[in-house]
Image (cartoon, rainbow, N blue to C red):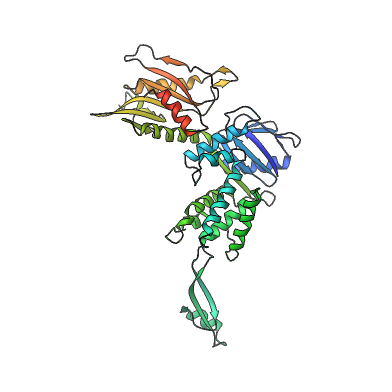
Amino acid sequence: MKNLTLREAYDWLYVDEYSPNGVTLEEWENLLRFMEEKYGGENVMELGIRKLRFINLVGIIQLKTVRIEILPKISLHHQDESVNRRVLLNMLNMTRQLPVHLHDRTLSQFEKVDLSHLLAHLFVTELYKALKRGIYRGYEQKQENLPHLKGRLMISPHLRKNANHSIHAFCEYDELSPNVTLNQVLKAALKVIHPIIQQNNIRTQSMMIHELFDEVEDRNIDENMLENIQINRQNQHYENVLQLAIAILQSTSMTTCFNQQNAFSFLFKMNDLFEGYVGECLKRLIAPTSYKLDLQHKEKRLLINVHSGRSNISLKPDFVISKNEADGPTPVLVLDAKWKSIFNGTQLTYNQADLYQMYAYVTAYKSAERCILLYPKVQEEFTPPKWQVPDVIPEKYIEIGMVRLDRVDYTIHDLDVILEF
């Protein structure tokens, strides 16, 4: 299996099997078909001549002969991929995109390997732990022609089948069996994840689990099956591992065959992930204070139509922080999270359209004195720019702030310094 690691919006993938970041023509065509099926019409790739790079997308894509890991572009040092991977794991963990919580020790352990190995390790170890309490059994409905009466006699099929065999009875009955939907889903996820496993002890556990599922039927899993699984007191210890199985199966192209292969992906939109991560950190920071946090605030409009009198062009900043006062919350600060770098090499560069957007926010929110564009931190030594809005009383400012992303406490500390509460 060929393993490639690329940085989102930075590294190119080439049609060149001899390049470190290259694939064969067949792998290239399979990848393009897969991406078209999964993200057709979305701007998630930049295509060049026999090359592409991923835009606003991170995670894992695995085809038959190649695994592509796409990491956030935080560290630009080729030898330090673990920094980018640590950032991704930290953000996924904080935003609960992974069905189980990872502790700092676990994050440190898996920042050296790609996301597929983390999924495989978590799924197999959680499933092995759950199965130690015994395989779950549920009642399965069966219909059989038996030499004795069991359950309910089914008259019509009994007459058809036993006209010449009066000693038999065609019956319908319920029997405790491991062949239930929950176990079928877990087995299907195990089959997807097993080829990814590299650690010998985890592979051994996977094979032992497969033997325990010997009586469980192999099924093509669809959304209806996933939605109909019931968690009860007897199987609630499977809840976490079931969520992992669902994540694995929903990330698998079950119906797409590229040269008789199934494609597996575990991908995330980076803009949404960054915004969600900042939101979770802000919640922790704001919770013990007298301030209120609103996400995707929608109360303001930019203009009023003189003919209809209606407000037009809705404004939707990512975060609005308000001070709780006697007559209600008063917005004091507006933030927008931008997943992009404001550096071109060492040169500071920013998008003027982003500043126009912030000017609209700080103008519409009359009581807000500060508007902040929030970026991921890619350089340590940096004095962020700050602009005063002219001819406005009280004074208003548009600012740029950057936050570290490799640890939650670092991000919260940086936000605390930026907000100055």
Q: Is residue 324 left or right of residue 296?
A: left
Give the image location of residue 25, x and y in percent: 73, 40
Q: Is residue 37 visible?
A: no
The quadrant in which residue 348 appears is top right
- Please give the name of the residue rendered at 59% of the width and 18% of the height, measured from the top-left corner: 346
Of residues 264 and 404, the one drawn nearer to the viewer in this rendering: 404
Q: Is residue 16 above or below residue 211?
A: above
- As drawn, which residue projects farthest toward the front? 105
Give the image location of residue 234, x and y in percent: 44, 62
The quadrant in which residue 291 appears is top left
Q: Is residue 202 above or below residue 147?
A: above
- As drawn, which residue projects farthest toward the left? 326
Q: On the rendered image, what quadrant is the C terminus found in? A: top left
Q: Is residue 365 visible?
A: yes
Of residues 55 and 248, the one drawn nearer to the viewer in this rendering: 248
Of residues 412 and 310, the one drawn nearer to the viewer in this rendering: 412
Q: On the rendered image, what quadrant is the N terminus found in? A: top right
Give the image location of residue 175, x and y in percent: 49, 72
Q: Is residue 232 above or below residue 261?
A: below
Give the image location of residue 67, x and y in percent: 66, 42
The quadrant in which residue 344 appears is top right
Of residues 224 and 232, the one drawn nearer to the viewer in this rendering: 232
